[in-house]
Image: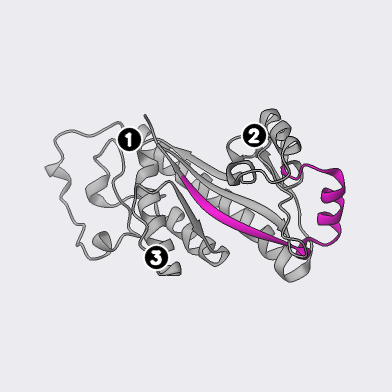
Amino acid sequence: MGLDLYIEAKITEKATGRCISVPNTKEIKDYWFKYDDPDEDHKHFCILWMCGQKAAAVRNSWIDIINRYMNTNYNYNDFRIPFPQTALREMCSCLFSYGITPEDNRFLISVENGYWDKIQRNEQNNIPYEEAKEYPSWNECADDEHEFLIKANDLRNFIYEIERIHYENKYEPLEADHCDGLWRGGSLRLPDDFILLEDDRRKFSEDPQAYEWSFRIFNSY
């Protein structure tokens, strides 16, 4: 099985603690209406999605960051890992750092770590070019690094909107897809289309500070 790495969120009403968000799929919407208290997997929706072996390196870096922020000991095999909103900026900065990979990773088919990792920051990283015997095509390497940059920029745009809520009590919906979260050209609006009831959407739009966001990593493999 391959790795699917998600940043997920849910939105709850501060006054009541009632969750107003839901993943945007018909099956889960039907489940949400059927039960008064859906389980956590029917409350969270996707903010950002990455897949494949290259996502494993980002996952490891993110879990290290989360453990520092929360003073926890999550390991890289844990499935669901909550984290505070305050960690988002460093997680985004970390993801941007994968837009250019270390010297000892540039000949690998799948990135193993990035400059954000302590082991890399302490290395000289001056491997001579002539030592490389085999390497993937430069187009493949460039595509991987470009994807990191695209995802990082999407996450940064999301952070701007979360902070607009915090400081200005207003927001601008972002383009999104059903499963991939933020996605330019997506047919959905985030978070509007992930708030199921029309009355909740109206109230959220009028006073977004009346609602609390919580976040987690879903490390699915």
| Earlier residue among tags 2 and 1 | 1
Find the distance from the CA under tag 3 to the CA under tag 2: 31 Å
Quarter location, residue 85: bottom right
Mark 3 closeness class: few <14, some 14–19, many ≥20 residues within 10 Å = few
* Dot 1 amino acid type: Trp
Q: Where's residue 46, x and y in %?
A: 59, 43
Q: What residue lies at 31% left-to-right and 43% top-to-bottom? A: 111
Q: Which residue is mark 3?
A: 72
Colouring used for the render = one colour
Quarter location, residue 219: top left
Q: Where's residue 21, x and y in %?
A: 71, 47
Q: What residue lies at 82% left-to-right and 49% top-to-bottom? A: 201
Q: Is residue 205 magenta?
A: yes
| Earlier residue among tags 1 and 3 | 3
Q: What residue lies at 86% left-to-right and 44% top-to-bottom? A: 198
* Residue stretch in magenta: 194-218
| Earlier residue among tags 3 and 2 | 3
Q: Which residue is mark 2?
A: 178
Q: What residue lies at 72% left-to-right and 34% top-to-bottom? A: 29
Q: Which residue is mark 1?
A: 138
* Dot 2 amino acid type: His
Mark 2 or 1: in front is: 2
Helix, strand or loop at label 2? It is loop
Labels 3 and 2 touching (C-beta < 8 A):
no
Mark 1 or 3: in front is: 3
* Dot 3 amino acid type: Thr
Q: Is residue 25 above or below residue 71?
A: above
Find the distance from the CA under tag 1 to the CA under tag 3: 39 Å
Labels 2 and 1 touching (C-beta < 8 A):
no
Helix, strand or loop at label 3? It is loop
